[in-house]
Amino acid sequence: MPSPLPFPTAAFAWAFVAALLAALAVSAWVDWRTLKIPRPLSHGLFAAGFAVAAVRGGWLGADGRAVWLFDPAGAGLGVADALLFALAGAAVAFVIFCAMFAIGVAGAGDVKLCAGVGAWVGPTLFLLILFFAAVALVVLSLGRVAVRVAGGKVPD
C-alpha cells in the first residue's frame, strides 16, 4: 500500500498543507472567540477536502501513480480512488467524533470540522493526528496540574 497521502508534486503538497492549516487556523480563531464553529467553515472544509482529493487523485492517476487502494489506471480511476479515500477519512472522523459528541466531550461543530479534516487527510493520517493530539492534551493537562501544585494550589 502506498503512503497515506501521496502528492503529484512538492508544490501541490505544500499548497495542500498551507490551505488545510489556514482553514484550521481560521476555525480555531473563530471557535476561540465565539465557542462555535460556523457551518460555512466546517462545510466548506468538508467540500474542499473532496475537491482537493479529486484533483490529487486525477493528477496521480493520469501520471500512472497509485492514489490509495487501486492500482494506477488513469485519471478517472484515480479520482474515484481519491474520493473513496476522502470518504473513508470523513467517515472515520465522523464516527469517532459522534461518539465524543454523544458523551459530551465534543460539540456538533467539532464533529463536522473533524469530518472535514478526515476528508483532507484520510483515515490513517486522521487517526495518527488524533493520537498525537490526545498525547499533547494529556501532556498539557499534566503540566497545568504540575504548575498549580508547584504554586501551592490543590488541583480541581
Image: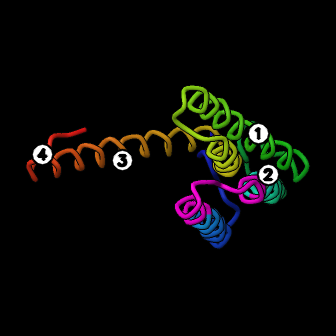
Callouts 1 and 4 close, C-beta under 8 Å: no
Report, in whole angstroms, how far the alpha carbon at label 4 lies from the one at label 3: 20 Å
Q: Quadrant of the N terminus?
A: top right
The percent position of residue 147, horizontal first and vertical second, equals 16, 52
Report, in whole angstroms, how far the alpha carbon at label 3 lies from the one at label 1: 27 Å
Give the residue displayed 72% in from the left and 59% down from the top. Answer: 41
The percent position of residue 62, horizontal first and vertical second, equals 84, 57
Q: Earlier in the sequence, mark 2 or mark 3?
A: 2
Which residue carries the number 4 mark?
149
Q: Quadrant of the C terminus?
A: top left
Report, in whole angstroms, how far the alpha carbon at label 1 lies from the one at label 2: 8 Å
- Between 1 and 107, the one lying in front of the other is 107
Which numbered dot is residue 87? Answer: 1
Q: Main secondary structure of the magenta part?
A: helix
Label 4: how many residues lie within 10 Å, few (<14), some (14-19) or many (20+)? few
- Between 110 and 151, the one lying in front of the other is 151
Which residue carries the number 2 mark?
50
Tag 1: residue type? Leu
Residue 25 lies within the magenta run: no
Q: Nearer the viewer, mark 2 or mark 4?
A: 4
Give the residue displayed 59% in from the left and 46% down from the top. Answer: 3
Which residue carries the number 3 mark?
136
Report, in whole angstroms, how far the alpha carbon at label 2 lies from the one at label 4: 47 Å
Tag 4: residue type? Val
Tag 2: residue type? Phe
Q: Earlier in the sequence, mark 4 or mark 3?
A: 3
Q: Is residue 93 above or below residue 63?
A: above
